């Protein structure tokens, strides 16, 4: 039993002609979405090889500098280093790179082409910007949020008649964006999409799940979650998820590099009680509040964070800023306080109970 790195070591020297695209290659390309290719990969169809792009990237960032952005960035750095000289990946063509990040939204996507084989459209998950985390909350009460609108626009612009076989996917929020992109792809593009990968990404509200747009992607949808999933069990996807064993038994199972691989197959495992309880508690909490109540709660929380000049996850280690946020939360009305208390009790209670059993 190994991980994504043992797969790269064994199959990285084999072309796609010898070894066909599989679910693990999907994980590789989903992880690549966290690489900052700004000023390296073009925003149009002008291509650059993965190897050349990687070499330019490593001239810009050291591991220590890039790893500070978070776990996904640390892992993507290591993965790019592992694949950049492998025949299976080094000549992949990268193009249509987009990154948008401000107080309102966070979105990134890129196209990866293997000549004569396929195109993979990869969507980035949540990064260090608070706006991306706010959008994760917003998915529970609004559709489409800004990043989802960006995914709809992106898929409409990035594909051409030259893209005969297309896969789209992403990790975490990127998996949700891949589903949205598939749901709203133009007919001429949709029929070229072979599979839509949601790798431990959150789902949708019932309204979106029961839509014609979602119904059309169900036959192409591949949902993969680790056995200790937290993100991938949020909301619903109407998809029988492939549950893969993780080397972690906590929230860090979310990281793709912890997922276990047996040769070129995902190592299956039953979903843990931890994940089952998290899913139950979060969905109970969501059902106890209306869309407008969840919107109010989210706005209140993030307004408090922004008022304390917290723009990204690294500001959270600033004690003075955190004290300011706590004071703001204390000033919430009774309904907002109750919602926060309920959220903590639902989830913390389940986690403690599971840990003690």
Image (tube, grey):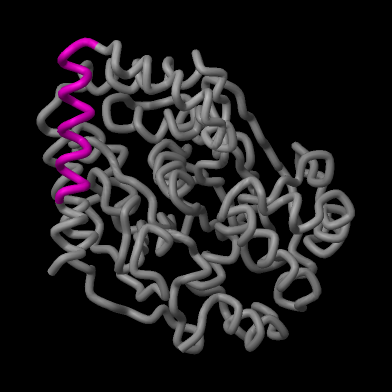
Residue 210 showing in the rendered view: yes
Does the segment drawn in magenta span residue 336? yes
Range shown magenta = 333-349
User: Against 261, is 165 above or below?
Assistant: above
Q: Quadrant of residue 156?
A: top right
User: Against 183, is 354 above or below?
Assistant: below
Viewer-proximal residue, 106 or 331?
A: 331
**Place of residue 95 in the rendered image (x, y in percent of width and height, measured from the top left):** 74, 47
Residue 154 showing in the rendered view: no
Is 347 left or right of 58, judged from the image as shown?
left
Viewer-proximal residue, 122 or 76?
A: 76
Viewer-proximal residue, 49 or 349?
A: 349
Viewer-proximal residue, 160 or 230?
A: 230
Does the segment drawn in magenta span residue 252? no
Residue at 32% over, 19% down: 329
Q: Quadrant of residue 317?
A: top right
Quarter of the picture holding the C terminus: bottom left
Is 46 left or right of 202, judged from the image as shown?
right
Is 344 left or right of 174, judged from the image as shown?
left
Magenta part mainly helix, strand or loop?
helix
**Place of residue 20 in the rendered image (x, y in percent of width and height, measured from the top left):** 57, 79
């Amino acid at each position: 039993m190994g991980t994504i790195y043992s797969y790269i070591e064994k199959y990285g020297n084999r072309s796609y002609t010898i070894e066909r695209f599989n679910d693990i290659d999907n994980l590789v390309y989903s992880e690549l979405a966290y690489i900052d290719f700004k000023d390296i990969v073009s925003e149009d169809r002008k291509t650059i090889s993965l190897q050349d792009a990687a070499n330019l990237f490593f001239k810009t960032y050291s591991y220590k500098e890039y790893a500070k952005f978070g776990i996904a960035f640390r892992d993507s750095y290591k993965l790019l280093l592992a694949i950049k000289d492998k025949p299976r990946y080094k000549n992949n063509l990268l193009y249509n790179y987009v990154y948008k990040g401000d107080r309102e939204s966070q979105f990134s996507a890129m196209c990866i082409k293997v000549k004569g084989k396929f195109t993979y459209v990869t969507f980035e998950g949540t990064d260090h910007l608070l706006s991306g985390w706010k959008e994760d909350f917003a998915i529970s009460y609004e559709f489409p949020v800004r990043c989802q609108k960006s995914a709809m626009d992106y898929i409409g612009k990035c594909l051409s008649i030259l893209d005969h076989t297309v896969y789209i996917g992403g990790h975490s929020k990127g998996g949700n964006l891949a589903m949205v992109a598939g749901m709203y792809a133009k007919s001429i593009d949709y029929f070229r999409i072979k599979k839509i990968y949601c790798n431990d990404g959150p789902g949708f509200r019932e309204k979106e799940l029961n839509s014609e747009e979602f119904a059309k992607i169900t036959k192409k949808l591949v949902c993969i979650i680790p056995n200790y999933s937290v993100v991938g069990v949020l909301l619903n996807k109407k998809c029988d998820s492939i549950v893969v064993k993780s080397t972690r038994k906590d929230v860090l199972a979310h990281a793709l590099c912890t997922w276990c691989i047996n040769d070129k197959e995902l190592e299956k495992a039953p979903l843990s009680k931890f994940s089952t309880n998290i899913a139950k508690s979060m969905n109970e909490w969501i059902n106890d509040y209306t869309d407008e109540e969840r919107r109010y709660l989210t706005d209140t929380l993030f307004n408090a964070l922004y008022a304390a000049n917290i723009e990204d996850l690294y500001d959270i280690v600033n004690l003075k800023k955190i004290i300011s946020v706590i004071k703001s939360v204390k000033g919430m009305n009774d309904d907002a306080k109750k919602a926060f208390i309920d959220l903590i009790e639902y989830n913390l209670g389940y986690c403690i109970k599971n840990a003690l059993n």
